Amino acid sequence: MKNGSFFVPTEQLAGFMKNPEMKNCEGLLLSWETDPAVARRILPPPLELIDPQHPVVSAYVVNIREPTFAPWHMEACIGLLCRYREIPGITLLNLQLSGPGALMGLCTGREGSGLPKKLCERIIVERTDDYARAFVEAKGRRIFDVEVELNPPGMPELAKAAKAKRGAKERGSCFVFTTELRVGSVPADGIMLSRARLLNYDNVNAFEVCEPGAIKSIAMEPSLDDPWAELSVVKPLYGAWSVYSNPILGTSVLAEFQDAEANKLFPYLFAGRFDRSTICPGHQRYGQF
């Protein structure tokens, strides 16, 4: 049996994360209006909501069939539509991953670009005729469960918009934070984040299929570690079954924060990346969870 080595020649490393792309993603794209007070409270500064009175959540649950950086895996994401100055985009609050490539998807995304990724037990996304269903189970809780009716009657505008997406390439911005942590006992100055950067994660969604849908139900079980339920559904907006690829064009630094200024971001960034076991003395889990 062939064995690897803890030393990898430099010429082989030239291919590391070269032209990263989530190829051939299939599943549900979703959006809904949420509680304005909650959205304002959890949005990391210096980002601002595009519509403070009607904040919009954007989410997806997909099977990433051909990622260039890992084996196939399932991924679910939740975020808020927002802007940095004049740049519109989405801030990614949390991504959950499962399946054979989940660990490499998590490591490359977190270490390379600051994506707030976690591993979960199970992600399911499925479709039968015009019925689609997806759910995410993390630490024994079903933190997200959605049902969508595809191609329903009486949705001419959505159908027209979805048809226009087929073959289209939509470029967008995702706002993510990279951080430098001080791990160990709390320093005298109380600063746990010594540095943070706000990045523009420049990417493209290249659609092959996009079929409009009506969200029939969304249920989110409360969770101390994965609080998706905080972004409650005030008004369902849009669901779509899509097949698309997502090449990453690059990242650029929008803002930098040091010491106390960086540390002010930690309350906003913690829950998407870490569990409460890292901040409390009482914690234990047995069995599969």
Image: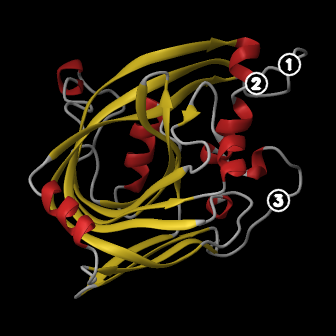
Q: Distance between the Cα atoms at labels 1 and 3?
A: 24 Å
Task: Indicate the position of residue 106 as horizontal and vertical percent values.
Answer: 44, 46
Q: CB of mark 1 within 8 Å of CB of mark 2? A: yes
Circle 1: element type? loop
Task: State the mark number for residue 283.
Answer: 3
Q: Residue at x 68, y 19 (%)?
A: 262
> Which image quadrant is residue 40 in?
top right
Task: Indicate the position of residue 62 as horizontal and vertical percent values.
Answer: 33, 63
The residue wearing badge 1 is 187
Pointer 1 or 2: first along the chain: 1
Circle 2: element type? loop
Q: Residue at x 28, y 74 (%)?
A: 155
Circle 3: element type? loop
From the image, which quarter does the N terminus lie in? bottom left
Amino acid type indicated by mark 1? Pro
The residue wearing badge 2 is 192
Of marks 3 and 2, the one in the foreground: 2
